[in-house]
Amino acid sequence: MTEDILYFDNNATTRIDPRVFEAMRPWLTEHYGNPSSAYSAGRKAHVAIEGARRQVAGALGSRETEIVFTSCGTESINTAILSACSMDPDRRRIITSAVEHSATLKLCDHLARRGYEIIHLGVSREGMLDMDALRDAINSDTALVSLLWANNETGVLFPAAEIAGICRERGVALHLDAVQAFGKLPVPAEILDASFISFSGHKIHAPKGVGALYVNRRTRFTPLLRGSQERGRRGGTENVASIVGMGAAAALGGELVAVEDTAVKEMRDAFENRILETIPDCAVNGNRGHRLPNTTNLSFSGIEAEGALLLLDERGVCCSAGSACTSGSVAPSHVLSAMGLPAEAARASLRFSFGRFNAMEDVLHGASLVGEVIARLRAESPVATASAPVRFA
Ligand code: PLP
């Protein structure tokens, strides 16, 4: 579908799928009963929520009772980590990585101030996790391992099934942040060994303001928000329409994954190849073989990403410098810094993330616009003209 804007920022958020919107519509207009009410309008809303729960569980291969609806991925992450800490208060070590989403990192910073020992596993130059370092970090004091499945900035994948196997063998709780991976990759059955898995609606063509948390039936759990809804696991009157939307999007899961693996991957690869062939002194950040099919993160020597974003925005191209949550700040991305990129290269990087509503002609047109913008910035930039171009190995 051709749009007015060239939207290449699907890791920041996605457009609602029209089928998802149609499923939601009655719950935004006609049916407004509270799902906790005993009369039929309430019961109807309750049934709709249970239908959505079945759809999410079906996409994962879990039991319905293992799915708790939340307000977003961030809430799911906070719930999982804080639950693990409160259920095992004597264990004070949390193992995570240096390249997590800010939802995990900021909560871990907060826990560090309350006496927790936070281990931030490093990554290689390609963004990959060292499994031996994970094994070595797990000790009898470990309350939780909390790791990404797919990195939002580079798309690089951590081996979720292998991580789940290690944590199971060592008897430690695992939280997987599957916010970016869900809907883009098939779900291996092994990851259901995790204690918790976090999901977000707005990354899978459902609306913002809804998420889900998988809580393994063998995991002891304590809620973040207390109340009677969600069987006491998440208080607060349910966001019925959005939960229905999340269910409808999850039910499209197999189709979404197939499209990501074919059309979306083809567009990402065509875009990336066009950029690499036509723009000198640029390089892909992250392992190109172990990545989400929709993401490319590129550094362009001699530019500041913030300037590129402004010029691209003028041309209708939406993309990101670092993650959306930290854009607007000039600090280099913590993910690229953890991968060992010099600050200069990290500040010169842009993330493009494609989706099912992009079209190949728009993607290739976008690649030409990126070429124009980079050439203009380099021509104007004192950095680019005064110093030799930086090489990004
Ligand atoms: N985890 C990852 C990997 C993400 O990319 C994001 C959002 O960008 C989140 C968590 C937070 O999800 P939400 O925006 O639903 O709070």
Image (cartoon, rainbow, N blue to C red):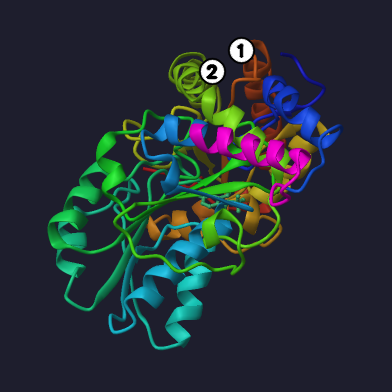
User: Of the numbered discs in the image, which one, if any, rests on residue 360?
Assistant: 1
Where is residue 315 shown, x and y percent of the image? 80, 30
Q: Nearer the viewer, residue 90 or 258?
A: 90
Q: Nearer the viewer, residue 288 or 70?
A: 70
Q: In the structure shown, which secondary structural element does the residue marked by tag 1 occupy?
A: helix
Where is residue 255 shown, x and y percent of the image? 49, 17
Q: Which residues are magenta?
A: 35-54
Q: Is residue 169 left or right of residue 167?
A: left
Assess whether mark 2 and mark 1 are in contact (beta carbons under 8 angstroms): yes
Q: Residue furthest front?
A: 39
Where is residue 276 shown, x and y percent of the image? 48, 26
Number of numbered tags placed on the structure image: 2
Q: Is residue 160 visible?
A: no
Q: In the structure shown, which secondary structural element does the residue marked by tag 2 occupy?
A: helix
- Ligand 1 has an atom within 8 Å of the beta carbon of the residue at disc 2: no
Q: In this picture, is 84 found above or below 39?
A: below
CA separation in Å, label 1 and label 2? 6 Å
Q: Is residue 40 magenta?
A: yes
Q: Is residue 10 magenta?
A: no
What residue sits 42% from the left and 57% below the top? 99
Q: Nearer the viewer, residue 61 or 393?
A: 61
Residue type, numbered disc 2: Met
**Where is residue 206, by image quadrant?**
top right
Q: In this picture, is 67 found above or below 329?
A: above
Q: In this picture, is 358 found above or below 66?
A: above
Residue type, numbered disc 1: Met
Query: Which residue carries the number 2 mark?
Result: 267
